[in-house]
Amino acid sequence: MTPIEPIRKSVTIRRTPAEAFELFTNSINEWWPLRTHSTSKERAVRVVVEPGPGGRVYELRDDGQEIVWGAILKWEPPNYFSMTWHPGRGEETAQTLELRFVANGNSTSIELEHSGWEKLADGAIEARNDYDGGWDGVLKACSDWCIEK
Amino acid sequence: MAYQSPLEALAESTRRQIFEKLRHGPLPVGKIADHVPVSRPAVSQHLKVLQQAGLVRQHRVGTRHLYSIDLNGLAEVRSYFEQFWDDVLAAFQAKANQEKK
């Protein structure tokens, strides 16, 4: 399956890369919209970003349960970090999230890249030999998607 | 039933198990029910939620109803996250710029 184009987003803020990196990771609870952007919504208490490679990123629910969002892959403050991304899903469907903090005069651009979309359907593609009919529709959906990109 | 985002739909552990079973290929409800610790009607209910979140599709082969991962749904999941990251980065930007003039 042709890779699906990553999502790319960026914003510029009036901060140094070091400040931006700190705010995005260690101080994430000061701004992350947890009530709407978490798996447990109003029951979510906080987000935890454990710094360094292998560190976990998870949300803490009001009953003490930790819901893992992913794990840090590369940790290069103040300019870059990457992590696996599988909130509410199994690790084998993990996608990749990359954050770059680029100095830009007195400001910093934060560039986000969310890739690995085909990961969500890999199993379905590999299982095509077992697919007794109906596969045409799936392939068509796949090619429509690839052409669209 | 209220529409659920893919993230919410998969936050429930049984639904996650069902979704992951389907990653290996299409299955009928009965087969799925063999692998998860809930009743068949409960599995059907979970499949409905997954369908509404755009993650799973249903199709017929002869007299059998099979469920599989919805590749069209991937587009929906992707656009859900487009919006998700817009919101997150907007919140980040607002916070960052508010404290330092």
Image: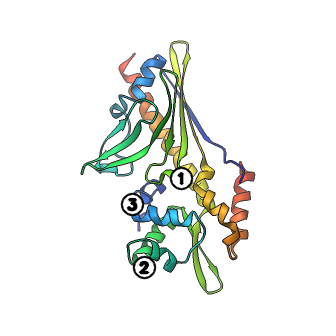
- Tell me the subunit letter for badge 1: A
Residue contact between numbered discs 3 and 1, judged by CB atoms under 8 Å: no
What residue sits right under mark 1 in the picture?
Answer: A93
Residue contact between numbered discs 2 and 1, judged by CB atoms under 8 Å: no
Give the residue drawn at x 48%, y 20%.
Answer: A78
Above-or-below relation of B81 to A141? above
Above-or-below relation of A101 to A86? above
What residue sits right under mark 3 in the picture?
Answer: B12
Q: Residues within 10 Å of mark 3 (few under 14, many from 20)?
A: some
Relative to A129, A13 lies left or right: left
Q: Position of residue B84 (x, y in %)?
A: 48, 44
- What is the three-letter code of the residue carrying label 1? Thr
What residue sits right under mark 2 in the picture?
Answer: B40
Give the residue drawn at x 51%, y 77%.
Answer: B31
- What is the three-letter code of the residue carrying label 3? Glu
Residue A32 image-quadrant placement: top left
Relative to A143, B38 lies left or right: left
Q: Position of residue B89 (x, y in %)?
A: 47, 34
Residue B25 seen: yes
Q: Residue furthest bottom?
A: B63
**Residue sitting nearer the eye, A109 or B17:** B17
Q: How is the image coloured?
A: rainbow
Q: Residues within 10 Å of mark 1 (few under 14, many from 20)?
A: many
Residue B92 marker: none
Q: CA distance from mark 3 to mark 2?
A: 17 Å
